[in-house]
Amino acid sequence: MAMPADTNASGDIFGGWVLSQMDLAGGIASGQRAEGRVVTIAVDKMKFIRPVHVGDVLCVYTSVGRVGTSSMEIRIEAWALRHRYGHREKVTEAIFTMVAVDDSGKPRPVPTQH
């Protein structure tokens, strides 16, 4: 839920707060696909469509796109459930590139799906 401490001077939620929630969701999705540790290396096509307001619940949805040797594209959409109970509106979308890494932080192969 978006809280007053997350607002900018105009009273809207900081884009950086929304981005961090999306990064968390992307890390979960890519970590599951990679079966281990991942890092974010790029955010592409970030598009802020509508503002997020205090009291909105941010719902973040992911899907795994292209999978390379060690990298993955994660498509992420954020939707706001207005005033906790109201209608849903798409507020942001982006493509995150995540890389699977080993314990020393070096890229490692993403396992093939069975």
Image: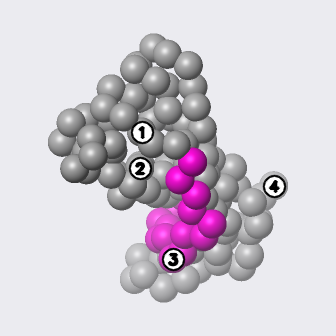
Of the numbered discs in the image, which one, if any, rests on residue 52?
1
C-alpha gap between disc 1 and disc 4: 39 Å
Give the SS element for disc 3: strand
Q: Quadrant of the N terminus?
A: top left
Amino acid at the residue labelled 4: His
Give the SS element for disc 2: helix
- On screen, residue 114 above or below 112: above
Label 1 crowd (10 A; few <14 / some 14-19 / many >=20): many
In percent of the image, x 71 and y 79: which residue is there?
69
Q: Residue furthest right?
A: 114
Label 3 crowd (10 A; few <14 / some 14-19 / many >=20): few
* Location of mark 2 (residue): 18
Q: Nearer the observer, disc 1 or disc 4?
A: 1
C-alpha gap between disc 3 and disc 1: 25 Å
* Location of mark 4 (residue): 114
Q: Nearer the observer, disc 3 or disc 1?
A: 1
Are the two marked residues, 2 and 1, in contact with CB atoms closer than 8 angstroms? yes
Specify whether residue 80 is painted magenta: no
C-alpha gap between disc 2 and disc 3: 17 Å
Tell me where the magenta segment starts and ends, as one range.
28-49
